[in-house]
Image (cartoon, rainbow, N blue to C red):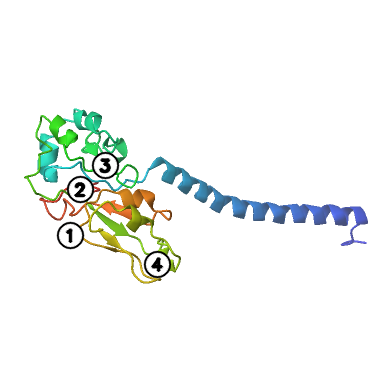
């Protein structure tokens, strides 16, 4: 009879329709997955620019860039490997110039300033006697800080080398307070922090104040 199918034809048509629907679902999933894959490739090919500071005694950023010959002598002179050459991810204007990322390699602010002594170009200058030298300041990120989340932790205070301490604990549920008058930006607290909740930032951004030390510049 017209319009009726045999059992074999019924299953053949049914399977064909099922496979068609399955293929539509697969194609619908593949498209967004391809977009995710593309986004991951792009993010991997564009490394994040690190927040950095200049070595002790650095001239204001514009003057520093003009004076620095990128000779690497300050990098070689640092006994604690705190100074490194800026990588290409920071752009051609900064690549090869000396920077510090204190949360990775703290600056111990040597009393004899070997990095400054090694700089013949004058991009780094000796501080006047009695001058308090800073390279940046510590910033505590509340969202990651154990103390701010109510968990006991005092690593940053214990290891701060300043006397009196440049960082102090608050009440449970509060992040530690950083003293702008005492913090040198050495980075010891940032390196020791088990939650990676502390970062060292320039005291002033060169974009905002040409007398600022240094900072992440595009």
The residue carrying mark 2 is: 135
Q: Earlier in the sequence, mark 3 or mark 1?
A: 3
Could you classify mark 2 by the number of other residues whose Cα lies within 10 Å: few (under 14), some (14-19), or many (20 or more)?
A: many
**Does the residue at mark 3 contact the one at mark 4 (Cβ under 8 Å)?**
no
Q: CA distance from mark 1 to mark 4?
A: 23 Å
Secondary structure state at the residue bearing disc 1: loop
Q: CA distance from mark 4 to mark 2?
A: 26 Å
* Quadrant in which the N terminus appears: bottom right
Mark in the foreground, 1 or 4: 1
The residue carrying mark 3 is: 100
Q: Earlier in the sequence, mark 3 or mark 4?
A: 3
The residue carrying mark 1 is: 181
Q: CA distance from mark 2 to mark 3?
A: 9 Å
Query: Which residue is pictured at 8% across the width and 49% down the height?
Result: 130
Q: CA distance from mark 3 to mark 4?
A: 28 Å
Residue 191: where, in percent of width, then height?
A: 36, 48
């Amino acid at each position: 009879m017209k319009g009726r199918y045999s059992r074999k034809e019924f299953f053949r048509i049914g399977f064909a329709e099922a496979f068609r629907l399955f293929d539509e679902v697969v194609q619908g999933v593949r498209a967004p997955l391809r977009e995710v894959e593309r986004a991951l490739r792009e993010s991997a090919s564009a490394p994040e620019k690190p927040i950095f500071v200049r070595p002790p005694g650095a001239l204001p950023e514009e003057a520093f860039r003009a004076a620095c010959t990128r000779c690497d002598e300050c990098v070689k002179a640092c006994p604690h490997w705190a100074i490194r050459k800026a990588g290409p991810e920071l752009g051609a204007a900064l690549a090869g110039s000396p920077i510090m990322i204190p949360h990775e390699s703290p600056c111990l602010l040597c009393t004899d300033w070997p990095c400054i002594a090694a700089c013949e170009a004058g991009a780094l200058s000796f501080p006047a006697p009695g001058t308090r030298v800073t390279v940046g300041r510590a910033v505590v990120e509340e969202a990651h800080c154990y103390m701010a989340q109510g968990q006991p932790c005092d690593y940053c205070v214990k290891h701060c080398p300043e006397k009196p301490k440049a960082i102090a604990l608050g009440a449970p549920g509060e992040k530690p307070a950083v003293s702008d008058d005492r913090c040198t930006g050495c980075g010891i607290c940032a390196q020791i922090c088990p939650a990676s909740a502390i970062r060292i930032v320039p005291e002033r951004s060169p974009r905002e104040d040409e007398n600022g030390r240094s900072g992440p510049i595009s």
